[in-house]
Amino acid sequence: MGYGSTAVSVLVYAALLLALPFSTGQEARRREVTLSVCKLDQSPVPCAKFGLEARIRGQLIQLEQYVNADGKSAFLVPGDLKAARGIDLIVHTPHGEFQVNQLENSWWRDDWELGLEHRPFSDDYGWAVKNKKRKCLGYVVYTNSEPGRVVSTTDCN
């Protein structure tokens, strides 16, 4: 082979590289979580009333909400959280706050449902209450997780 065939090979390789979508890397950096439903004592409320923070290795990160193209509240998952393990979520509501500890990294995507309930608990999440003295229940539902819907419940104050 001469220099001509090497030049052609380099041009073909360069053309293949240019044909690849460059947005793939940027989309991978922008993981969005949509807050599809937010409830206080079983009544729907605007998700903007909920404040969200993540704690990773002792550092608190404010999760800034915005309205996405579908008109729903959402937030972008900060890059620090994407590769982290054991992330805590702190949810502030007008009726109290709760914290879900050690969230799986794979749950920081897609659609979430958030809520806080006081007694009497709904049938939807009351089954998760093992402590009969519990007066307040906070929950996060990860709607597109594997193997399906996953629910995290915790005490709240």
Image (cartoon, helix red, strand yellow):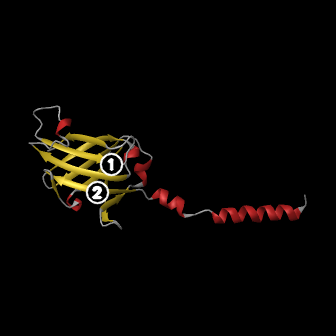
Q: Tag 1: residue type?
A: Thr
Looking at the rendered image, the quarter that the N terminus falls into is bottom right
The residue wearing badge 2 is 36
Question: Are circles 1 and 2 on residues that touch, CB within 8 Å?
Answer: yes
Residue 16 in the figure: left or right of residue 128? right
Residue 151 drawn at (x, y percent): 28, 42
Residue 138 drawn at (x, y percent): 20, 45
Which residue is painted at 28% across and 46% down in the image? Answer: 141
Q: Residue furthest right?
A: 2
Marks 1/2: CA–CA distance: 9 Å
Looking at the rendered image, the quarter that the C terminus falls into is top left
> Mark 1, residues whose alpha carbon is within 10 Å: few (<14), some, or many (≥20)?
some
Which residue is painted at 11% across and 32% down in the image? Answer: 132
> Mark 2, residues whose alpha carbon is within 10 Å: few (<14), some, or many (≥20)?
some
Residue 21 in the figure: left or right of residue 122? right
The residue wearing badge 1 is 143
Callout 2 secondary element: strand
Which residue is painted at 14% across and 46% down in the image? Answer: 117
Residue 78 against residue 58 in the figure, above or below: below
Residue 77 drawn at (x, y percent): 38, 55
User: Within the image, what quadrant is residue 93 found in?
Assistant: bottom left
User: Within the image, what quadrant is residue 70 found in?
Assistant: bottom left
Give whichever of discs 1 and 2 has the lower sequence position: 2
Q: Nearer the viewer, residue 60 or 20?
A: 20
Residue 135 drawn at (x, y percent): 10, 40
**Which labelled disc corresponds to residue 41?**
none
Residue 38 against residue 124 in the figure, above or below: below
Callout 1 secondary element: loop
Residue 134 in the figure: left or right of residue 79? left
Q: Tag 2: residue type?
A: Ser
